[in-house]
Image: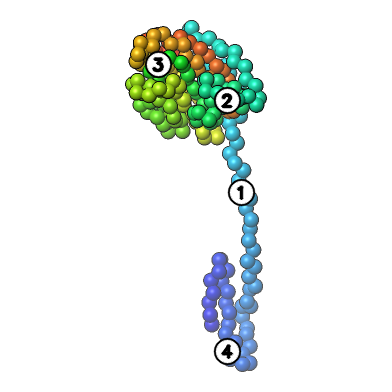
Amino acid sequence: MTWFWKGSIVLVALSMATPGCVVRGRATIPTVQARVVVPAPPPPPAVRVSVAPPQLAGGVSVVAHQCAAGAQEVFNGFDDNCDGRIDEGFVGSGSIQITLWWQTGADIDMYVKDPAQETVSYSHRTSGSGGQLDRDARGACTNNETTENVFWNSPNPPSGMYQVEAHYYSQCNNAGPTPIVLSISVGGAVIGAYQYTLQPEERVTMATFNIP
Ligand SMILES: [Ca+2]
Ligand SMILES: [Ca+2]
Ligand SMILES: [Ca+2]
């Protein structure tokens, strides 16, 4: 007698080596090797949220930047081609993107606090929620970049309140008061673009917004 084990079915096969042997007992159970095809789960949905306009600090004003489908995206702190990504090709984009841009030689730092109260900045470039900073402009006056960018590229970033601060860290070469542009995109759409003139050493909460 030979035992076979296949899945949860035990087959008993009796050796027929002895001619005339009458098999009584359990008959051989035919096995069916069916292959169950499990469809792949659909990709997680991109965040689809209706985000109220951010709350702005005093002195921060809305910029009515016009985008145009098919336009060339230039490095200017705005979404030029209406695809919901700000300066794509220059900085990282995702389901949330927050971009701070300016034109003087000042070293300005952006701080983005996520709903878990974890702040992404040059000194803490990734958060547990998936936020990441990919641009540290001027880096204590050591590079020539003039944008800082934080984004979440996870499909569904955490719900809750986000806070965006800007800090004028250093004038470097006497940059003086510096107009800054802040653009925020959530779920593939820009929810606002804002401007403010930052004074040396000033730190301001530019905007807060909530993802329900
Ligand atoms: Ca774009
Ligand atoms: Ca642009
Ligand atoms: Ca900086």
> Could you say which disc has been placed on residue 17 in the image?
4
Instruction: Determine which residue is flagged by label 1.
Output: 40
| Image quarter hosting the C terminus | top right
Which amino acid is tagged 1?
Answer: Ala
- Residue 111: image quadrant is top left
Whether residue 41 appears in this view of the structure is yes
Query: Of discs 1 and 3, which sits in the foreground?
Result: 3
Q: Position of residue 173 (x, y in %)?
A: 35, 13
Q: Is residue 17 above or below residue 3?
A: below
Would you say the residues marked 2 and 3 are in contact, meaning their CB atoms lie under 8 Å apart?
no
Image quarter for residue 65?
top right
Cα distance in 3D space between marks 2 and 3? 23 Å
Q: Residue furthest bottom?
A: 19
In this rendering, does residue 113 appear at all?
A: no
Q: CA gap, disc 1 to disc 3?
A: 51 Å
Q: Is residue 124 left or right of residue 19?
A: left
In space, the residues marked 4 and 2 are separated at their CA atoms by: 81 Å
The disc, 2 or 3, on the residue closer to the chain's N-terminal end is: 2
Does residue 116 appear left or right of residue 31 in this picture? left
Q: Amino acid at mark 4?
A: Ala
Does the residue tagged 2 have its C-beta within 8 Å of any atom of ligand 1? yes
How many angstroms separate mark 1 from mark 4 (CA)? 48 Å
Secondary element type, mark 4:
loop
Disc number lying in front (3 or 4): 3
* Proximity of marks 1 and 4: CB atoms separated by less than 8 Å: no
Nearer the camera: disc 1 or disc 4: 1
Where does label 3 land, which residue? 105
Residue tagged 2: 73
Which dot, 1 or 2, sits closer to the camera?
2
